[in-house]
Image (cartoon, coloured by chain):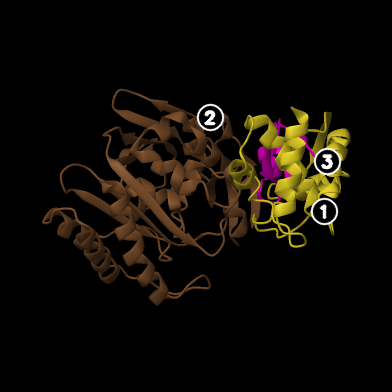
Amino acid sequence: MIIDEYKKPKTIEEAYSILTTKENSQIIGGGAYMRLSKKHIGTAVDLSNLKLDFITETENYIEIGATTTLRELEINDITNKYFNGIISKSIKNIVGVQLRNIATVGGSIAGKFGFSDLIAALSVLDSKVILYKTGAVNLLDFINKKHNDVIEKIIITKNNLNADFQSIRNTKTDYAILNVAVSKHNNNFYKIAVGARPGIAICADKAESFLKTVDFSKENAEKAGLIASEEIKFTSNFRASAEYRQELCKTLVSRAILNINC
Amino acid sequence: MKINLKINNQDKIIDIRPDEMLLEVLRKNGCLSVKHGCDTGSCGACTVLLDGKPILSCSYFAAKADGHSVTTVEGVQNKVEKISKYLVDEGSVQCGFCVPGLVLTTMGMEKELNNPTEDEINHYLSGNLCRCTGYVSHTRAIKKYLEDKK
């Protein structure tokens, strides 16, 4: 990677201005993944001085600042208190503590990495990305659309839903071969996200629809896993084959549904 | 560009390239204990303490460290000798390449966790890979060190 100029703006307005006016400018999160790319960046914008490293709780939301590190998120009492600790569970095996002390929430979301465990977990919660100019954007809309804007924070509605996260890795600290996040809102309303396919996490709409029509049972959890594995597209890479991922999907989806209900 | 860096309690003004990683800057400034391992953020050999927290210097832009304090093995010799004795006694050292990173991560853990369990120790140190001895002797050594420190 080549960077011509490195800036640490003092205000979000300044960061936004650099991002939108300077050629080939890019916000760097923690920078840990970005440095592996072969990009040529004109101006790197580092948000470290903007006081965006916070995790707070309001009456209705959990708010997570863009420069909060994954390690801070992993061990935070607020995030661990809700959703069966799915956020911490999703990130605690990402490489080691040292990398999680670098990688940021904003960088993990903006990077839209296929292997992202955090995106899978946030996809099944009511999560919004707060952008400086654009305002609030649903996480899934943010992932599917390009925004030339500065992420200020992520907000998650505190709705006490039950959630679970599952992943399979070749070794403990490797990136996931497949990750699955499931949440149950009320009655039979489930959200299921499958990521590291190796593409970015996507929702298993047909499996969610199936679960709306049936009562919980081990058999129906397994059926939902099968439906998810048939509706989602998997591909092969050096970590695993598409066929292996498809098999894993059945088990991980049904296991997460069982964990939520037992 | 110039950055202000406190390396092992010494204030320095260092000229860097905007895309230079902290690992290269530290080694150029005499901190050869910081090892150039995988260079992909996977092995932990390049671990240093940034304001007391363990980070991978191969994956951290030097420009980002401007105004911060960095600790390497060169700055904590006494502590390193103490922890290393336990590692040697438990047969946890062969080539020694992973040891500087392992010791600094252990120091980060000491600061962050009170009386960690064996599972917590293993989880905290899981980002430090060793291709010589395996990990059982590491865990045994660190556990003994922490117990004797009480």
- Residue under pointer 1: B91
- Residue under pointer 2: A50
Residue at 77% from the left image edge and 53% from the top image edge: B98
CB-based contact (under 8 Å), mark 2 and mark 3: no
Given the image, what chain letter belongs to the residue carrying mark 3?
A: B
Give the brown chain's letter. Answer: A
Q: Quadrant of the N terminus of chain A?
A: bottom right
- Residue under pointer 3: B73
For marks 1 and 3, the one nearer the N-term is 3
Picture coordinates of residue B116, whole percent (x, y)? 62, 35
Q: Is residue B22 visible?
A: no
Q: Is residue B150 magenta?
A: no
Write down the region rendered in magenta. B47-72
User: Do callouts 2 and 1 point to residues on the same chain?
Assistant: no
Disc 2, SS: helix
Given the image, what chain letter belongs to the residue carrying mark 1?
A: B
Please tell me the colour of chain B. yellow
Q: Amino acid at mark 3?
A: Val
Picture coordinates of residue B65, whole percent (x, y)? 69, 37
State the residue in front, A139 or A38.
A139
